[in-house]
Image: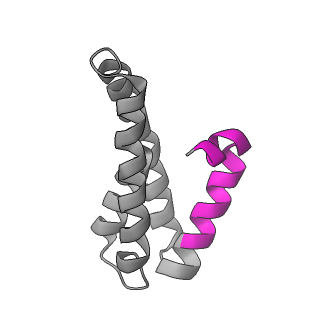
Amino acid sequence: GQVFAANGIATVIAVNVTYFQLEVGSTGFQIIIVSAVVLFAGIFCAYLFAVASKYYTLKQLWTFILVLWIILGIITPLTMTRGANFLLIVAIGGVGYSF
C-alpha cells in the first residue's frame, strides 16, 4: 500500500497488469474489473478507517492491517495462480489489498 501511494498510479497499473497477465492469466477486461474493485473498495476502506480511528488507537488499527497483509501475503501465491477462480482473484486482489 505505502509503496503504491508513494509511487503513484503508474506503479499500481504496472504491477496489476504484469502480475495478473503473467502469473494469473487474466484478460485485459478482468484487470480493469479488479482495478475498479480496488478503487471502490479502497474508498470504502478509507471511510471505514476514519470511523474506526474514533474507537481504536492508530497502533491497534496498524496492527490489524499489518496482520491482514501478512495473511494475504501468504494466501496470494498459494491461491492466485493461472486458472484461479476470478471471484477469488477479485476478493483477494481487489478487496483484500484495498485495506
Query: Is residue 9 left or right of 80 when viewed as pictured?
Result: right
- On the question of residue 56 being in view, the answer is yes
**Numbered marks: total:** 0
Q: Residue 86, how many percent across, how many down?
A: 33, 71
Residue located at (38% from left, 20% from top):
50
Q: Residue 37, how many percent across, how many down?
A: 40, 49
Indicate the colouring scheme: one colour
Q: Nearer the viewer, residue 5 or 28?
A: 5
User: In terms of image quadrants, where is residue 46?
Assistant: top left
Residue located at (53% from left, 68% from top):
28
Q: Residue 44, how many percent across, how many down?
A: 35, 32
Q: Is residue 16 magenta?
A: yes
Q: Nearer the viewer, residue 25 or 91?
A: 91
Query: Is residue 94 left or right of 35 when viewed as pictured?
Result: left
- On the question of residue 93 being in view, the answer is no
Q: Residue furthest front?
A: 59
Q: Residue furthest bottom?
A: 83
Above or below, comparing residue 73 to residue 60 in the picture: below
Q: Nearer the viewer, residue 48 or 59?
A: 59
Above or below, comparing residue 75 to residue 58 in the picture: below
Residue located at (62% from left, 62% from top):
15
Q: Is residue 27 magenta?
A: no
Residue located at (43% from left, 85% from top):
82
Question: In what quadrant of the picture does the C terminus appear?
Answer: top left
Q: Residue furthest top?
A: 54
* Magenta part, dominant SS: helix
Q: Residue 55, how many percent across, how many down?
A: 27, 17
Above or below, comparing residue 66 to residue 87 in the picture: above
Which range of residues does the magenta coloring cover? 2-19
Query: Is residue 21 left or right of 78 when viewed as pictured?
Result: right
